[in-house]
């Protein structure tokens, strides 16, 4: 059983991003979203670590974040945090599709 460090790192990045959004801007929505999507990404990383073909939860989670943060980046034009999370989430989607195949 190999640990999927990339997926766990992604989960940590999403969670920490939500916490930072709350501490810097006072955004409760950032905190809720970061904790929710970070937790789902962490559980998905755990599932992938146990069965490398079990990518469904992680793929859906990263796909939703890619779309949501990509739209936010397009609207605001700000690389941080929307563009960064959209890019990393897109990387995760591509990676998970490759792992699935």
Image (tube, rainbow, N blue to C red):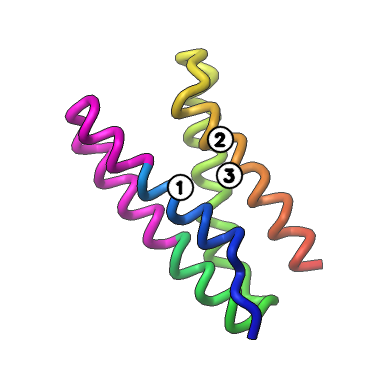
Q: What stretch is highlighted in magenta?
A: 17-40
Name the chief secondary structure element in magenta: helix
Residue 65 forms part of the magenta stretch: no
Image quadrant for the C terminus? bottom right
Q: The residue tagged with tag 3: helix, strand or loop?
A: helix
Please determine whether, in this image, residue 84 is positioned above or below residue 18: above
- Mark 3 in CB contact with mark 2 (< 8 angstroms): yes
List x then y, in percent, for residue 66.
56, 40
- Mark 1 in CB contact with mark 2 (< 8 angstroms): no
Image quadrant for the N terminus? bottom right
Residue beneath disc 1: 13
Residue beneath disc 2: 86
Q: Which of marks 1 and 3 is nearer the N terminus?
A: 1
Residue beneath disc 3: 89
Q: In the shown orientation, is residue 25 left or right of residue 80? A: left
Report, in whole angstroms, how far the alpha carbon at label 3 lies from the one at label 2. Answer: 5 Å
């Amino acid at each position: 059983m190999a640990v999927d460090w990339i997926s766990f790192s992604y989960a940590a990045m999403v969670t920490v991003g939500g916490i930072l959004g709350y501490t810097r801007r006072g955004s409760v929505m950032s905190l809720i979203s970061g904790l929710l999507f970070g937790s789902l990404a962490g559980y998905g990383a755990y599932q992938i670590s146990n069965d490398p073909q079990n990518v469904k939860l992680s793929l859906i989670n990263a796909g939703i974040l890619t779309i949501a943060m990509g739209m936010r980046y397009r609207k605001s034009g700000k690389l941080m945090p929307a563009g960064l999370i959209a890019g990393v989430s897109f990387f995760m989607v591509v990676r998970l599709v490759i792992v699935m195949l």
